[in-house]
Amino acid sequence: MPRSANVLTPLWKSIAATLRSAIADGQYPEGSRLPTEADLAARFGVNRHTVRHALATLIEDGLVHSRRGSGTFVLSKPLDYPLSERVRFHRNLRDAGRLPGREILAIEVRTATEAEARRLSMTPGDEICVAHTLSFADHTPIALAESHFPEARHPGFADALRSSRSVTDALATVGVADYLRTETRLSATIANATQASHLRLPEGAPLLLTESRSESDGVPVEWGQTWFASDRVTLTFDFQRDQLP
Amino acid sequence: MPRSANVLTPLWKSIAATLRSAIADGQYPEGSRLPTEADLAARFGVNRHTVRHALATLIEDGLVHSRRGSGTFVLSKPLDYPLSERVRFHRNLRDAGRLPGREILAIEVRTATEAEARRLSMTPGDEICVAHTLSFADHTPIALAESHFPEARHPGFADALRSSRSVTDALATVGVADYLRTETRLSATIANATQASHLRLPEGAPLLLTESRSESDGVPVEWGQTWFASDRVTLTFDFQRDQLP
DNA sequence: GAAAATTTGTACGTATGTATC
DNA sequence: AGATACATACGTACAAATTTT
């Protein structure tokens, strides 16, 4: 039997608002499961359709997501990762109130191919250091990176990176006090099996790929590709702000 | 019978290089099909495995892609789309030597929701103009956009946009001579059925999503989301260049 | 590992108030 | 004023995916 329709706001809208504020209040924390649609319907005293309508708006807004047979879960808000000419991973994460973490998957030293040499302003055959790393925020993987460094120009860098575990520190020990990002290219890809496994994502999840070059006094010191788990990170930048170190 | 191994560069590498330069020379234009693996093997006088090894590197680099039973096809190089505080679609495309095009899918004028009002510094209930557009480069769709404009602040904007078909022109007719992009957020998504159909992509293709706000004299004039077909566009930006109009 | 229970997704239908032509 | 379309809401049933037994 239809409810008297003499209302200012629709039922589903007020239910959506209630759920929204309950999530905002931390009543349903990130990753937690909402009550089942049947439960919510009973609690609000409405039909299941009405609850579904409310939930649809939360899903649309990326606040929750539902899995058939499993339930509706609160999504964690993606980390804002500001891109600037002075991108520093640890600093970015601490500024966002998250615990930064980095795991080195592999470090190899080998001779540069033609394309790699070009990107680092070297000659093919020169030694480069290639580092594969996995970055974490609060123990959750957020990005997978493949970074190329001109080992020939900075001998001992690979060893420094192995012991220091921070790019900025390792560069400092080989004499690169400061460096700036000079070029950034952005595209989107689909996670392959390897990437998905490292990032703990389903295969086929959307990834944000950045390709960037950093220089120190006009000389390239790094060229790298980084694949971000797009549902955990949002890259941001504004041209106004001149952020200082 | 194995070939004498006393060689400087491996066979597959020189074959890959030959194919690369053939593609670069325009011998195999964008979208065209390479000779079959059997043909290439015969032409280079090697085993089909060797050709496959060479092709694998081209596929890895995103230069070509292969479809079982169909062939190997030359991919078109993605358009470089520079992001700056002064992003102008038509100008960006002409600078890249492409033919810009824009199709207006829908323009609606309605009252702003709470979230929309916040983004445009308005009050909920104020009138906004929402435009759904599709952008083309050389008649190929590259981006799908949903733009929000403060109609209440600039009465007549919707009509201006309907007749002018350029955001910059339409803003000019309502008195906004210049505007700058103040905020940009980036993420990656998967194309849904609607997006895929408009962009002429397979469902599930990776999209690059930008969310941006533009202001004129500190007052918001546009808030929009743009979904780029990631295999056709690469967003770029460098902090060095101060590009002038 | 198979079966059962749980939970979301989809589809049919009904009814009524509200806005539009 | 009447016809028509739309939004809201309830009822029921079954399919499909997941979790639990």
Image: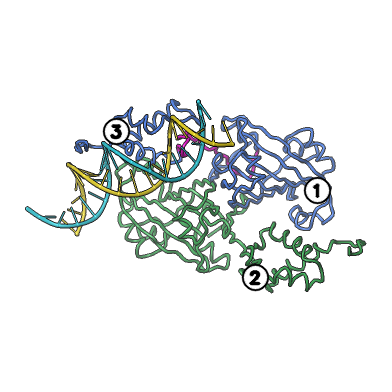
Chain colours: A blue, B green, C yellow, D cyan
Name the residue: 44% across, 49% down. Answer: B215
Q: Which residue is mark 1?
A: A128
Judged left or right of residue B104, residue B239 is right
Dot 1 alpha-carbon crowd within 10 angstroms: few under 14, some 14 to 19, many 20 or more? many
The magenta stretch spans residue A188: no
What is the chain identity of the residue bearing mark 1? A
From mark 1 to mark 2, how far is it between C-alphas?
35 Å
Q: Which residue is mark 2?
A: B33
Tell how many labels: 3
**Secondary element type, mark 3:** loop
The magenta stretch spans residue A82: yes
From mark 1 to mark 3, how far is it between C-alphas?
65 Å
User: What percent of the width, then of the height, locates residue B58?
Assistant: 71, 61
Amino acid type indicated by mark 1: Ile
Q: Which residues are magenta?
A: A63-88
Eyeballing the image, is B219 above or below A244?
below
Q: Which residue is mark 3?
A: A46
